[in-house]
Image (spheres, rainbow, N blue to C red):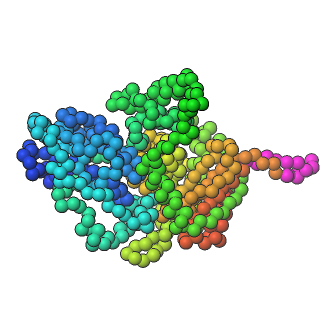
Amino acid sequence: MSAAVLRQLPVLLAIARSYASKSFPPHTIVSMPALSPTMTSGNIGTWQKAAGDTLAPGDVLVEIETDKAQMDFEFQEDGVLAKILKESGEKDVAVGNPIAVMVEEGTDIAPFESFTLDDAGGEKAPEKKESTEEAAESSEPADTGSQTAPSTLPKKESRKEESAPEAQESESTGGRLQTSLEREPSASPLAKALALERGVPIRQVKGSGPGGRITKQDIEKYKAASSAAPAPSAAGAASTYEDIPASSMRKTIANRLQQSMNQNPHYFVAATVSVSKLLKLRQALNTAADGQYKLSVNDFMIKAAAVACKKVPAVNSSWREIDGQIVIRQHNVVDISVAVATPIGLMTPIVKGVEGLGLSSISAQVKDLGKRARDGKLKPEEYQGGTFTISNMGMNAAIDRFTAVINPPQAGILAVGTTKKVAIPSSTEEGNGVEWDDQVVVTGSFDHKVVDGAVGGEWIREFKKVVENPLEMML
């Protein structure tokens, strides 16, 4: 949510204050907000406040699960929570539907015990969006303010008429939202990671933290308890499987990847790249850094990808439909999306303007974005957009090479495998022998609608040239 919108919230809230058909004191209807262009509904997570609790600006009211992430709803006005209209666990609450009632401090909330959704103006069903429109906006909405954002597509008149129910006062909620890790149920990031690592069904764990929040200790106790439990008899054997409901984040990832494979004709170009010089340069720079920074191989890969994108700009492009006309948008800046594995799914935070950044700046941004992605604290504009993506699985020594799925509307993604020592025949004055070379296999996935095969091959050639001569990154 932009600062301009936040400044207008008090005015919008005044519009939302109303009297229902019955006799209720003045109140404010808090409605489900639209947190992304593709969001038509959301799920209610854990309420952090109960009826009668006082709220101060910045207090977390409730957790809301969107189609992209889990968000903390921070209320930005003084008041008292009079009634919760949608309880924790409510699914697919349409944008604009009432979820709570607020009153000013000192107002008697007793009359609101009988307050219902009908008194708040009723609710509507979630709006259905065409899958093609969602695919076009899935990676980058039109209103992010990014230089790479697509233009807004025209909407049909019928959709305008369906945009709001008759009794809806306002879609403003009076709050600011910040991302956090998915909490269904509510659990700390460490607890989620530990549960994932140990195969603990987190929904069966009873939380001992504030508000029933699951902690690391709860996961460890559950594992210990289950290990100590006697094995069931053959007659009462446990089920051989567990059905785990897909979260909104997982559904969104599944839909986007399926759409990408169906709508973007992928082709793949692989190359073996020597990183011996790069590793020596990295060691020298880290030694001279005196602890001010610590460069990773991936930092060099990101910079090399940006150099290649500037030399072969056709790859730094995307397929767009604007006002019914198909265009290929060639970007003048290189914003690299970096794939990061998190407990709730894959996120792609963006390092912007990489072509103008030094290695130390890239390293600092990647570390900061990666940590906040794993903690669920990225802002939408930090992971929506980008012009090219890198997915690096080099930290897993078992991965020689792999192929990645394009992140639409981008036209390319680079998959980076692990570093291997390879024996290279050599000839010296003393005779024939071998030298050991550090090598990485990289595989580029390109959208054939935008990037022809020869162009993809040229991009890989430029990338290989820069990586094998890393001093070029500093020119």
**In the displayed image of the protein, which residue is found farthest to the right?**
431
**In the displayed image of the protein, which residue is found farthest to the bottom?**
325
Q: Is residue 244 above or below residue 386?
A: above
Image spot of residue 471 (x, y percent): 64, 53
Q: Residue at x 64, y 63 (%)?
A: 268
Q: Is residue 81 left or right of residue 405?
A: left
Q: Residue at x 55, y 49 (%)?
A: 359
Magenta stretch holds residue 209 = no
Tell which of 216 and 166 is nearer to you. Answer: 166
Q: Is residue 414 left or right of residue 378?
A: right
Q: Is residue 360 left or right of residue 43?
A: right
Q: Is residue 475 visible?
A: no
Image spot of residue 256 (x, y percent): 48, 59
Image spot of residue 372 (x, y percent): 44, 42
Tell which of 353 and 74 is nearer to you. Answer: 74
Magenta stretch holds residue 435 = yes
**Most frequent secondary structure within the magenta stretch:** strand
Find the magenta span and give its range. 425-438
Q: Residue at x 45, y 33 (%)?
A: 204
